[in-house]
Image (cartoon, rainbow, N blue to C red):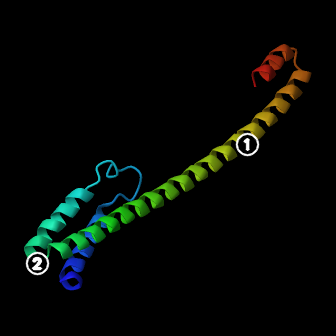
C-alpha cells in the first residue's frame, strides 16, 4: 500500500508542486505557499484510495511535507543565486560605465584646459573644472 499506491501519489503531488513554483523572483508564490492545500488534497485522495490505512497515509503525508519544504527551499536558493549573479553583473557594467565616463570626462578637462590656455574665457573653464 505504502510503496505501491501512496508514494507514487505523493511523488505526483510533489512534481506538480515543483512545476508551479516560480522560476524567478518576480512571482509572489513564496508569499502564498500552497503546501497546506497540497497536503490536504493528498490526505483526502489517499484516504479515499486506501481506506483503513491511516498510519500509512500519515507517514506518506509527512514524507510529502518534508519533500515540499525541501523543494521550496531549493527553488528559493536557486533564485537567490540567480539574483546575486544578476546584481554582480549589473554592478560590473555600471562600474565599467562609470570608469568610461570618468576617462571621457578627464579627456574633456584636458581639451578644455588646452582651449583655456588660448582663450580669454579661462575663468569660465576654471569654473567648469570646479564643477566636475
Query: Is tag 1's residue or tag 2's residue first in the polypeptide sequence?
Result: 2
Q: Which residue is rendered at x = 12% and y = 66% of the image?
A: 44
> Which residue is outermost to the front?
55
Vertical comparison of 69 with 9: above or below: above
Q: Who is closer to the viewer here, 26 or 68? A: 68
Which secondary structure, mark 1?
A: helix
Q: Who is closer to the viewer here, 22 or 34? A: 34
Q: Who is closer to the viewer here, 21 or 53? A: 53
Q: Give x and y (percent) for residue 27.
A: 35, 50
Q: Give x and y (percent) for residue 107.
A: 81, 36
Name the quarter where the C terminus is drawn: top right
Q: Give x and y (percent) for residue 83.
A: 50, 53
Name the quarter where the N terminus is drawn: bottom left
Q: Which residue is rendered at x = 91% and y = 23% of the image?
A: 117
Q: Which mark is residue 99?
A: 1
Residue under numbered circle 2 = 50
Rendering quarter of residue 51: bottom left
Amino acid at each position: 500500500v505504502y510503496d505501491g499506491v501512496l508514494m507514487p501519489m505523493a511523488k505526483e503531488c510533489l512534481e506538480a508542486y515543483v512545476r508551479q513554483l516560480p522560476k524567478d523572483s518576480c512571482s509572489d508564490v513564496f508569499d502564498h505557499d500552497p503546501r497546506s492545500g497540497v497536503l490536504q488534497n493528498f490526505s483526502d485522495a489517499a484516504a479515499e484510495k486506501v481506506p483503513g490505512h491511516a498510519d500509512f497515509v500519515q507517514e506518506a503525508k509527512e514524507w510529502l511535507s518534508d519533500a515540499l519544504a525541501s523543494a521550496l527551499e531549493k527553488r528559493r536558493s536557486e533564485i537567490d543565486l540567480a539574483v546575486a549573479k544578476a546584481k554582480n553583473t549589473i554592478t560590473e557594467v555600471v562600474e565599467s560605465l562609470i570608469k568610461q565616463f570618468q576617462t571621457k570626462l578627464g579627456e574633456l578637462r584636458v581639451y578644455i584646459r588646452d582651449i583655456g590656455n588660448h582663450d580669454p574665457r579661462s575663468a569660465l573653464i576654471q569654473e567648469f573644472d570646479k564643477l566636475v
